[in-house]
Amino acid sequence: MAETKYIFVTGGVASSLGKGIISSSIGKLLQARGYSVTIQKFDPYINIDPGTLNPYEHGECYVTVDGHEADLDLGHYERFLGIQTTKANNITTGRIYKSVIDKERRGDYLGKTIQIIPHITDEIKRNVKLLGNKYKFDFVITEIGGTVGDIESLPYLESIRQLKWELGKNALCVHLTYVPYLAAAGELKTKPTQHSVKELQSVGIQPDILVLRTEHPLSLNLRKKVALFCNVDENAVVQSMDMPTIYEVPLRMQEQNLDVTILQKMGLPIGEEPDLSSWKEFLNRRHNAKEIVKIGLVGKYDLQDAYKSILEALSQAATYNDRKADIHFINSENLNDANVEEKLKDMDGVIICPGFGQRGIEGKFVALKYCRTHDVPTFGICLGMQCMAIEFARNVLGYADANSREMDETTPHNVIDIMEEQKSITNMGGTMRLGAYECVLDPNSKVYQAYQSEHIQERHRHRYEFNNDYKEEYEKAGMKCVGVNPESNLVEIVEIPTLKWFIGTQFHPEYSSTVLKPHPLFLSFIKAAIDK
Ligand code: GLN
């Protein structure tokens, strides 16, 4: 395709309507037609990236291969499209301002007064077009975080207005709203949608397509009414009902010809409807899986979004093993020797979650001791892997005071230590060991069997590492270091081969599990959990 097409996805009425899923679904449908597609998220907050945000504020921090700490919506983009995103796919207001201020200090603006329009908006526009210009995608879908009407969103909306004006047919705006159902009146209400569209129009943006989130099916009449009041074609008013799984959404959008409407509006040939057969096959398997596999998730955040990618990776792997993942959150803060048996005995497998800091850490050791001594399939991820090493040092190697330097700076048995290059770092943001690193696997290991390959690359996000001074002792006592970084010699994977499945990874495999390519370690973990 000669020119890149730009699709903007905005939201109104309420937050959490699923702009990320709609963006991903549109991306999926266009990609299935043979176009190269990427999706970008703009977050209207001042943080440079979400890396320093508490998961209670913002859910999981996703990590791209190039080491960017990103919004969790990038995880949806990768899982739906099977693409890899980068730092260019997630921009915050903080980054926009920082870049403008840096340019000002360098003198790039030649004495001009720096203003929101045009300097901030130009920087936003530059970041939108960068993906099209530099990487030559056919479609760049840009999701604008927040809700229309927020003060924070205004510079983004102004940029979209300008881009739509400049790009003509090559740009289009999809606006997602909510249609509430008033039970007392027995009616669906379109007024919030009308107001939200007015809000967009008042900043000069006419949405081209409306996606209406609803819990009840919308009648043709209701859609006609919305079309009429909002200056949108009737076939461009699409409903998005609650679905048992988010992976149904692309199919529901296809049924309503959302992709066809987009192509028509952008003056592109329609061609044949793509069959999405492997996607449908995944959904069929998911739907037909009746038996469950029970997985305990031991961590300190009792909110779903904090472990988003792990949950998705587990449920994908369960689907490909023809099971339903029945995931139980087990708060590690409440876990002790007296109740661990009761909380874990029904689990087919246990995940020890990633995390930072002291809170809830002792409960992870309690869980690990139980799992190790009862041969429960167990998967430790990042901090979870570090906890595996610490629990083993305390209860097998006999170092009762073993710890990570993160939890106890003066521990005499620092089996997990701070990485050399981390010692001088004082800034918290963006300074961890981040992004994809190579790892070489021991051919005599379960991880090798799972990956079927000696060389792998996985994404990291941590400051601490396994202390190689103890490596020999561990291996003698039965915990093997089966994955090592070939350059730095850092231990990336530990495994107890005499147990059914007891593996810890310093990296985060969950980030690279997608709908059509479930992650080999999660597949193998779920299989072991089923066999138990
Ligand atoms: N807190 C640990 C570290 O910094 C682990 C981080 C994580 O689990 N992502 O090394």
Image (cartoon, rainbow, N blue to C red):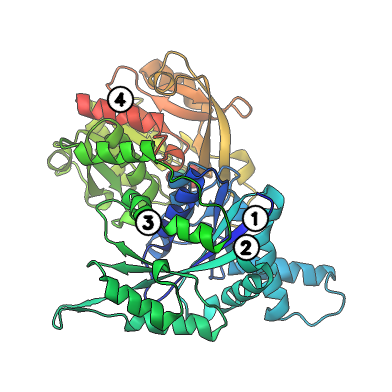
Of the residues under marks 2 and 1, which one precedes in the sequence?
1
Q: Are marks 2 and 1 in contact (CB under 8 Å)?
A: yes
* Mark 4 residue CB less than 8 A from any atom of ligand 1: no
Specify the quadrant that holds the C terminus: top left
The residue closer to the viewer here, 69 or 229, is 229
Residue at the disc numbered 1? 4
Q: Position of residue 315 (x, y in %)?
A: 30, 41
* Distance from Cα at disc 3 to Cα at disc 2: 21 Å
- Indicate the secondary structure of the residue bearing disc 1: loop
The residue type indicated by label 2 comes to Asn
User: Between disc 3 and disc 2, whose residue precedes?
Assistant: 2
> In screen coordinates, is 45 left or right of 444?
right
Instruction: Tell me the residue at 56%/46% (across/down).
Output: 35
- Which residue position holds label 2? 170
* Of callouts 4 and 2, the N-terminal one: 2
Answer whether labels 3 and 1 touch (C-beta < 8 Å).
no
Q: Which residue is mark 4?
A: 501
